[in-house]
Amino acid sequence: MAVSVLLIGLVSALCLFQLNSVFALGVSLDSLNQRSSFAAAWAGTEPSSEKLSHDYTIMPEPLRCKGSINADELQLLHAMVFAIEEINNSTELLPGIRLGYQIYDSCASVSMTVHLAFQFLNSLDLVFHTGKTCSQSGMVMAVVGESGSTPSISMSRIISPFNIPQVSPSATCTCLSDKQQYPGFLRTIPSDQFQAAALAKLIKQFGWTWIGAVRSDSDYGNNGIASFLEAAKKEGICVEYSLSFYRTNPHSRIQKVADVIRRSKAVVVVAFASSGDMKILFEELSREPFPPRQWIGSESWVTNPGLRKYSFLAGAIGFGIQKSVIPGFRNFLLNLSFAQVAVSPLLTEFWEDSFNCTIKESDSAGKKVCNGTEDIKTLQTPYTDTSQLRISNMVYKAVYAIAHAFHNALCQGRNVTAQCDKLTKLQSEQILTELKKVNFSRNGYDVSFDTNGDPVAIYELVNWQKTKAGITDIVTVGLYDASLPDGQEFQINKNIIWMEGSTKVPVSVCSGSCPPGTRKVLQKGKPICCYDCTACPEGEISNTTDSADCLPCHMEFQPNAKRDTCIPKPIEFLSFQDILGIILATFSVLGACLTIITTAIFLRHRTSPIVRANNSELSFLLLISLTLCFLCSITFIGAPSEWSCMLRHTAFGITFVLCISCVLGKTIVVLMAFKATLPGSNVMKWFGPPQQRMTVVSFTFIQVLICTIWLVMSPPFPIKNLTAYKEKIILECALGSAVGFWAVLGYIGLLASFCFVLAVLARKLPDNFNEAKLITFSMLIFCAVWITFIPAYVSSPGKFTVVVEIFAILASSFGLVFCIFAPKCFIMLFKPEKNTKKHVLSKN
């Protein structure tokens, strides 16, 4: 005795005035291998059942569907029948086993869906008539449907406790992926979770941050838009408004939604709604002109050719289920004989609506009578249009998935060409288990389910483009594959035509982009996409558009005028190219030349009384040291280096001590010379030339020792001074040890002070040419210069610190040259009569 198994499938409404069908599929183990036919009661439907009033005194009448048949749904029905017949004729899939089915109309109504679910659950002894009565009744094993999310939720809650698998071809609500609530639910269409993420990434890719959102007030719309808003928030997208509506809402509600769209600032509108709901909204929007809007659609309506008549939708983009090719399907659709139509109420209604005739003469009522000569191949309806097979392919794959689950349960481990075990008694939970594991390809399309019962999410990016003839075509311009790595999901391979036929991406932002050099400052009380652009503060930049923060430049860099990049700060030091550097270098060379000329004059007149009377040996040593003093100032000019920093300070310190030591020696000699003229004085023998040389060497050695300790312990080194000025870098020599620097200066000051005191004491000695007076003036200038130098040096910024130091060196050196040597040179050159021994030794 053969065993029969019932497979039930459901497909509900896709849009307004559509047929909402419940497919009841059955598998029949028929040893006669005869084709099983479909038996169903059909009713033309609107998307809801007829509402009946009840007074609770009598039994209510059965629920009825109202409205007219929809050709789209009829194509889906035949896609299921076509798949079943392919499987029944296959020698590889379920050999020797035939599928039976029954089709119900759910009217896209939750109440009708629940009613039908209880009906097939309670009709376990339902017998299929296939021309010959099956030998045994069938049991419900699986359901294909519903296509709507809300009816699918209701049905799944009823049949899941019985472990009956439910495979939906178009219910996309994210909530149905929850296996705790819907353990038996699977689908061949991707979850809205993937579509919501794809829509958010699509909007982000085109730079839109200010959008509007509308949705169906249903599980599909509410859950879908919730997932989208969550994904959009992560992408930094703001939503100006989010409105819900439903096709059965009062006109005032639809009108309110349309008015918000008309008045809004957002150019981009994301619509997560069913086709039927969008048709109602588009009808309302078409009543009055409104600003251009860039529509972004969910798969439910953006691939529906029936909405292309609304011209303002040209340029719309969105994601659709992949188009498919089902070999032989079109011929199957067109293979309808008049005899088949006459015996089916469903096909009768479709035939009469399509050809505007009536089959029964009694119902003609003035209409022409269909005579069988009508040719379905001449029809241009969604039923015959196989160019955009999307949901039909989902139905096709759902039937094949269930068939593979049966095959794996009945024919596992056997040759596919062999007969399967017809006597195996199956349980619905076995089919559910096998269904979760199916993995096959059909017509080039892979079919499998993840742990949530969802397939791999692959969408086509479609664009509504107007042709030259003014017809709107739905053109595939790209692909989105959620299985690819982040950032590589999109593949846009064709140009997109935007609203109003533009090829330029429209702009939809609350606030314009902030250019580099500015940052975003949020407007109080508004979303994060509404902001003002504020220039970056001093010392900071932003090098990207719409930067939230400005970044400080490194201390060696500063912002450019636009504050969009950091440029190196200008480096400043006293160079030979600066005017100051040139002037100071010139005076240094002039001073050195002047000293050399003076030396030459002294050499020429070295035997003259005025030279001999003023200690010629110390005079020549002093001239040499002054020449070095002038030249050492040049070491302060130019970019500091490690060697120049050590050289400039030590050379300056040692040469000046040598100079002051010579002056001090000359002063002592003057004092001692006059002491030696006193009767009985023998002091000059203690301060002769050897002692003078020893004095100069001793004083200079102390300075050399101080400089050596300074260089060994903590020598001067070059640094970049970043704090003196914000806008530039000062290259200078750090002192290393401040104690060493001030010890060098202090020692020079000590010698100069001592020399000045001695010179003052000797200034009034009775001599016609008393050199002590000249030394007094020179030391007065020297001390004045260096006393003034200290506060000027400390307070001078940047390169002017070096200028002050060079100026002090040059001023004090010129003071010594002019005060000590100029009067003598004048006498030797212009007053030779005074360059005599008598004149030099004469008393004042």
Image (tube, rainbow, N blue to C red):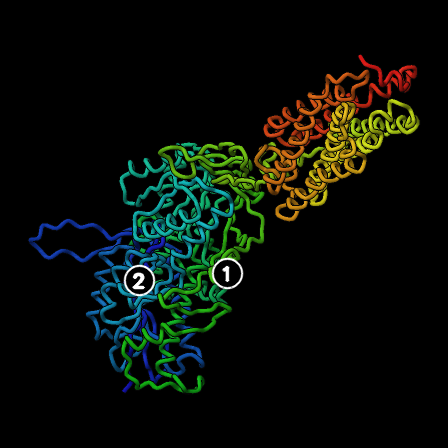
In the rendered image, the residue lying farthest to the front is: 680
Rendering quarter of residue 685: top right
Rendering quarter of residue 156: bottom left
Looking at the picture, tell me which residue is in the foreground, 103 or 352.
103
In the rendered image, the residue lying farthest to the left is: 57
Rendering quarter of residue 115: bottom left
Q: What's the amino acid at mark 2?
A: Asp
Q: Quadrant of the N terminus?
A: bottom left
Name above or below for residue 545 compared with residue 351: above
Q: Secondary structure at mark 1?
A: loop
Q: Looking at the rendered structure, which numbered label has been put on residue 178?
A: 2
Q: Position of residue 569 (x, y in %)?
A: 63, 37
Is 384 left, or right, of 23 in this rendering? right
- Neighbours of disc 1 within 10 Å: few (<14), some (14-19), many (20+): few
Q: Name the residue: 42% across, 60% down.
A: 391
**Residue occupied by mark 1:** 485
